[in-house]
Image (tube, rainbow, N blue to C red):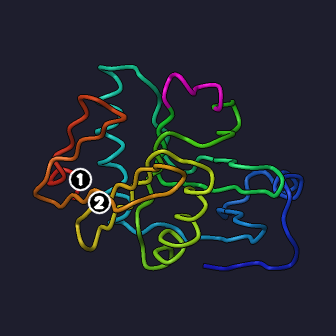
Amino acid sequence: MTILKLKAWTYDDYLALPEGDPLRYEVIDGEVYMPPASNIRHQRVISNLHFHFRTFLNGQPIGEAFLSPIDVILSLNPLQYVEPDLVFVSKERSSIVTERNIQGSPDIVVEILSEGTEKRDRREKFSLYERFGVPKYWIVDPEKEAIQIFQISDGRYHAPLEFGKKDVLVSSLLPGLSIPLSEVF
């Protein structure tokens, strides 16, 4: 992953990027990150998770799930811009969804760990999502075949709920959602 530290990036800098640029960018605390393309296992896991979200939401239209690449702008000044692997935005908060991007904190952010992003997902992004009050942050570890779900309380993430390949994942934000993780990993 490349980090550019030329200057603190702004939203105008982001908008000035060439349209159709095949690179992915994220800006955290003014630093630009260019994460590498996902590997095949990463793609399988996120595709399987998204399938379960979509299937559930088709039966219970309580919000929308968006698959990467999706621009999530947590703040314009300073620019805090990320492209999570998967996000869920409830109907009650649908006003943050625009035609171009999501402007605000989604209800759920899902990041799939990979060799090139694990440290950033566990440190910088963890801190960023906590700071901006993302209610649920899911960290998915394809190697360990496990998911950690962090929930914000009093402005902080506390000890996560942990699910393994043999478990069925449920979420209080999505009552009725039931994901057998053997179908994800």
Quarter holding the N terminus is bottom right
Q: What stretch is highlighted in magenta?
A: 90-96
Q: In which quarter of the image is residue 17?
A: bottom right
Whichever of labels 2 and 1 marks the residue nearer the N terminus, that label is 2
Residue 140 x %, y %: 35, 61
Q: x, y percentage for residue 151? A: 41, 50
The residue at the point 87 percent across, 58 percent down is: 13
- The image position of residue 2, as x and y in percent, is 66, 79
Few, some or many residues within 10 Å of mark 2 (<14, 14–19, 20+): many
What residue lies at 31% left-to-right and 36% top-to-bottom?
172
Side (left or right) of 60 relative to 1: left
Residue at 67% x, 62% y: name it: 26
> Do callouts 2 and 1 mark residues in contact (Cβ within 8 Å)?
yes
* Residue where numbered disc 1 is placed: 184
* Left or right of 148 in this view: 28: right
Residue type, label 1: Val
